[in-house]
Amino acid sequence: MDLARSEFSQDLACSEFSQRESPIGMISDKQVKLEPTSPLIEDGTSGQLVCGAFMNITNALNLLQLETKCLDRLPMGPKENVYFLVNNAHNITSRQNGQRSTFLDDCGAWDSSKGASPKSYYLKLPGGDTKQIYVKSGQYCSRRKVKRKSEFIPMENQPTPSEVLVVHRYYTQLKKDPLYKKRATWLGDGYCQSPTVLLEYSCIRQGYR
């Protein structure tokens, strides 16, 4: 099952959670913030997530485009409902050499068989907003649904490469605790390639407490 689309019910302790994206700092009646258990550095390179939800795409893209600071490596220790901006230079080199990206941490073994690596495209709009677009038959398209089916309509004015952000994501879950999730987000293959990767750790890992 695609981890990017799977949904789980969520309680206050985050023993189960929804993987819907949620804006930083916004809490619904069914969500609660927990105190982070990893050391967060108050310089923009790390922060707290809403319990059980990854960051929404607007905030993620803003961080990757605007934040100039990043960590050379992840801090040691539990990582629960937190995010980090980490130097991604070694992965840029690896991909140029036809190798896979790696996102090392001390959390344990991740289940690669349950991983997903979606690639998506976002059109940059005035004011810093973005809009998801799609590539079909070599053309940028918008999508509309007709009778529950998706139709892709080529855009009349095709965007230039500098107007499009190519967003890569990698989802995985811990082998020993499938409810404990990690997501990596970075920009690549397009006009704007991010030198950093956004790493998010969602939910509470069983066994730490």
Image (cartoon, rainbow, N blue to C red):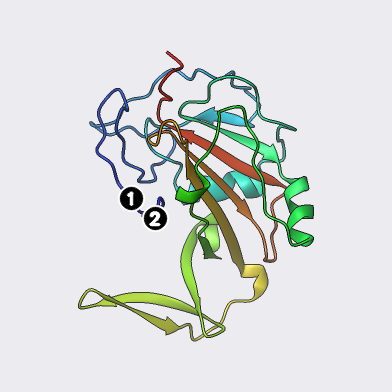
Residue at 44% from the left image edge and 46% from the top image edge: 56
Q: Which mark is residue 2?
A: 2
Q: Is residue 33 above or below residue 142?
A: above
- Closer-to-camera residue (20/93): 93
Q: Residues within 10 Å of mark 2 (few under 14, many from 20)?
A: few
Type of amino acid under label 2: Asp
Q: Are dots 1 and 2 in contact, CB under 8 Å?
A: yes
Q: CA distance from mark 1 to mark 2?
A: 6 Å
Q: Residue furthest left?
A: 147
Type of amino acid under label 1: Ser
Secondary element type, mark 2 = loop
In the rendering, at what x and y percent does residue 1 appear?
36, 55
Label 1: which residue?
Answer: 6
Residue at 57% from the left image edge and 49% from the top image edge: 185
Q: Is residue 114 above or below residue 155?
A: above
- Closer-to-camera residue (107/23): 107
State left or right for residue 197 relative to residue 87: left
In the rendering, at what x and y percent does residue 203 appear?
40, 30
Residue at 64% from the left image edge and 50% from the top image edge: 65
Q: Residue furthest top?
A: 209
Residue at 39% from the left image edge and 36% from the top image edge: 178
State left or right for residue 188 relative to residue 28: right
Query: Where does the C terminus fall, quadrant-wise?
Result: top left
Q: Is residue 59 above or below residue 153?
A: above
Count how many numbered circles sit on residues in the image.
2
- Closer-to-camera residue (93/108): 108
Residue 106, by quadrant, is top right
State left or right for residue 85 relative to residue 124: right
Q: Is residue 38 above or below residue 19?
A: above
State left or right for residue 12 relative to residue 4: left
Secondary element type, mark 1 = loop
